[in-house]
Image (cartoon, rainbow, N blue to C red):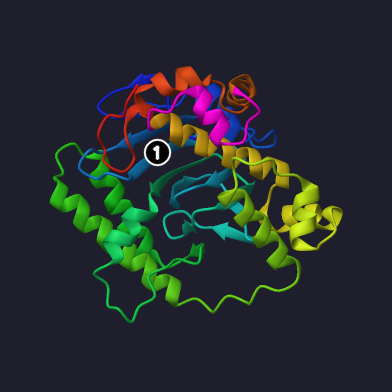
Amino acid sequence: MREHSSQVNDNCVVLSEAELECAGPVSRTTSRPPDVAERVTVRRRADLPGVEHWRVEASTRLWAVYHERYAFCVAHRSAGPQAWRYRRRVFEMNAHTSTMLIIPGEVHVTTQVPLSSFQVLMMDPAVVKRELAEETPTVHCDFSGGQTDQPIVARHFLSLCRAIEDAHADNFERRALLRQFLFAALRAEHDKPPQPIRTGCERAVMQVREMISSCIGENLTLELFEQVTNVSKYYLERSFQAKVGVPIHRYLKLVRLERAQELLRSGCSATETAHRTGFFDSAHMNRAFKAELGITPGAYARSPGALIDPVSGEPGRA
């Protein structure tokens, strides 16, 4: 799932329904007033390169998203309990106080959703590393992922979101609020109990994910994963879905689409992009884009949202 669309105003993109379909189905059990529609707005500020703000209003979608970047989320309005699954754990969120912390290379899946509104910040790993570089050397500047329920983290998050949406806020203010939020979130991370050591099939699942990330352009098969991990492909499939939240084939497709969009944004041709991301050819990639994103690779590459480089904040090449 990536962010682009049809309506653009000052680096602000409103996603269409077709573009949202790949993010997950709309819940059939959550009621919605007939005059209230889901609306997702994506904003990028040129003076805050590598940071992307999502405002999601009136959503009943069961989101299932693979993340190439850090993702942080706080709900600011909810009509009932909401929960999400990440790394074999189910977290229950409280509006205004819970903050989702998702690290690159992970999938999160919404398991319970009311009619709710929330905000998301996507950050390139280089941004997080740069902003945390001034932290004391004794602090391990990495996020482990999960959820923190410390209200101060959510407050810093919402302050940063307001500054990104405020056209009158300056770069100094936005950068200061960005650092304040990241430091608060990092401190909350270190207050959590240590993560258990991965053993057994957890190592196999990790190996599969590392292979997919580093060998995305190659012909990856279950048999190859079985050979490398020395774990039965049937058991590996079940373990992977239980631990990651989506089947291996779905995870592979999500990663390939994410990398393809990144290459298209940088100016790569459809043919070169298909070759580098493991699709059979550009026609195969074209079908995957339309099925998952509701848009062709060419239309995506031409969309204004796609033509902003996520690191420099400058327009990319068409």
Image quarter in which the C terminus is found: top left
Which residue lies under the disc numbered 1? Answer: 55
| Residue drawn at (78%, 48%) of the image | 222
Residue 24 higher or lower than 201, as above or below: above
Residue 48 on the magenta segment? no
**Magenta-drawn segment:** 266-281
Lateral position of residue 241 relative to residue 45, left or right: right
Measuring from the top left, give residue 70's x and y in whole percent: 44, 53
Q: Which is more toward the observer, 303 or 29?
A: 303
Residue 51 higher or lower than 131, as above or below: above
Quarter holding residue 26:
top right
Measuring from the top left, give residue 255's x and y in whole percent: 58, 42
Residue 149 appearing in the image: yes
| Residue drawn at (81%, 49%) of the image | 223
Q: Which is more toward the observer, 39 or 11?
A: 11
Furthest toward the bottom, the residue is: 138
Lateral position of residue 46 relative to residue 33, left or right: left
Lateral position of residue 248 relative to residue 299, left or right: right
Q: Secondary structure at mark 1?
A: strand
Measuring from the top left, give residue 307's x and y in whole percent: 34, 27
Q: Amino acid at mark 1?
A: Arg
Residue 63 appearing in the image: no
Quarter holding residue 302:
top left
